[in-house]
Image (cartoon, rainbow, N blue to C red):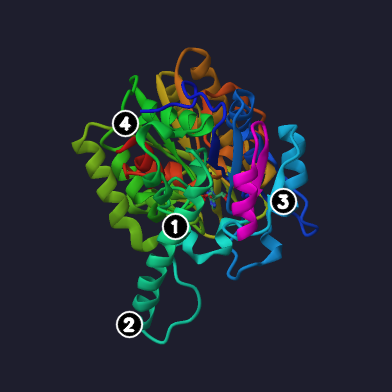
Amino acid sequence: MQTIDKFNFAGKKAFVRVDFNVPLNENSEITDDNRIRAALPTLKKILADGGSVIIASHMGRPKTNPDMKYSLKSILAHVSELLEVDVKFAPDCVGEEATKMASELKAGEAMMLENLRFYAEEEGKPRGEFANDEEKDAAKKVLKESQKAFTAKLASFADCYVNDAFGTAHRAHASTALIAKYFDENNKMFGYLMEKEVTAVQKIMTDTARPFTAIMGGSKVSSKFEIIENLLTKVDNLIIAGGMTYTFAKALGGNVGESICEIDKLDMALELLEKAKANNVKMVLAVDAKIADAFSNDANTKFVKVGAIPDGWEGLDIGPETEKIFAEVIKASKTILWNGPTGVFEFENFTHGSRSVGEAIVEATKNGAFSLVGGGDSVACVNKFGLADGVSYVSTGGGALLEAIEGRVLPGIEAIRGF
Ligand code: AMP
């Protein structure tokens, strides 16, 4: 397999798919540029080799072409500043101008294409209203054909293809997967960010040092069922935290008061407990909770046993006894995956549990464990608590990481690696 480090980009044009879908405020100013910074090593390596880059990304979910609210022009100046190169802008990702600009691009130069998702061909999903399924299927067929032309056009701009967009690796879109077919094995590769993400997932899922502990938090067991089910074939310990604690507690016959609880998912929780037993996985459930008399940071609080929450009260975080139990398991682990907070960490008074889990992970990492934090809110947690530098890897991919943990093949990875 080709790698970015081995590849010499001198005299080559590289089509680089990045994820520059950064959050913007109402004045179209970037509020968090981490995604841009994450792709810089790849872009800089290509330019330093004497290659040129065609930067391609999506932004938001535009429904028409164009929808200037989602124009990548808003981020052009900042990309130029960070890359330390005057990045040119193609106002239409596949138009005549883009073609001309790409053909005239010289060594050491960079250009950025307008939002790929201005075209429905990028995602391959027909837009608009359809009277019935037949009409929709017909539109899909037409789009499939124009998607081929769209993909071929993008591919024609460059000599090689680099995918550095892990955040969209779980999508089989034109620029994230289909385009790879237009380049032979030696001329397509992951960027540095993508390489790091793929290696991190591999360390968790295949080259696992034991014991392996996963901490699954967040709000609902239903949204994490498949992940937990797959993890039960991989981990030694599975810590259940966050809102799903109360679905398990209720399923086991406890009182959960007003806590978030999926009453129709009690069987699902029991099924997971059974599977854990069958697979010899230690399920670690919370034993005490910090409960509140309202869903508010300023609510009255107290600590009680998880299955003994009075009516009118709800569990918004784990209690001190649980913190201790979780920390012991985490600190004895050699591989750790953390997805989802232990409580409503958005409220300062209910951050303690998530912070203590984060701190235990940092300590385990210091002692040689490999720790991966990813999938939305746990990333927000480690950033909020200033713990990001103390874990082995913080993933940039939400949905993509979760699908990889579910054991699914990600089209963006498969298109380059072949599996
Ligand atoms: P998820 O997107 O499923 O990972 O869930 C993250 C969300 O779960 C965060 O917004 C947390 O506030 C929420 N959460 C965690 N613990 C609880 C809890 N005990 N009660 C209600 N929400 C919770």
Reading the chain from its start, which is encountered first: label 1 or label 3? 1
**Magenta residues, start to end:** 96-113
Q: What amino acid is at disc 4?
A: Val
**CA gap, disc 1 and disc 2:** 40 Å
Instruction: Looking at the picture, tell me which residue is in the foreground, 316 or 103.
Output: 103
* Helix, strand or loop at mark 2: helix
Number of residues whose C-alpha sits closer than 10 Å to that of mark 3, classed few (under 14), some (14–19) or many (20 or more): few
Reading the chain from its start, which is encountered first: label 3 or label 2? 2
Residue found at the far right of this picture: 27
Left or right of residue 378: residue 87: right
Left or right of residue 74: residue 140: left
Q: Residue drawn at (62%, 26%), measured in percent from left and top?
A: 50
Nearer to us: label 2 or label 4: 2
Mark 3 sits near ligand 1, with its Cβ under 8 Å away? no
107 part of magenta stretch: yes
Reading the chain from its start, which is encountered first: label 2 or label 4? 2
Residue found at the far left of this picture: 278
Number of residues whose C-alpha sits closer than 10 Å to that of mark 1, classed few (under 14), some (14–19) or many (20 or more): many
Residue at the spot of label 2:
134
Q: Residue drawn at (56%, 56%), measured in percent from left and top?
A: 116
Which corner quadrant of the image does residue 330 belong to? Answer: top left
* Helix, strand or loop at mark 1: loop
Residue at the spot of label 3:
298
Q: Which mark is residue 235?
A: 4
**CA gap, disc 1 and disc 3:** 22 Å
Residue at the spot of label 1:
261
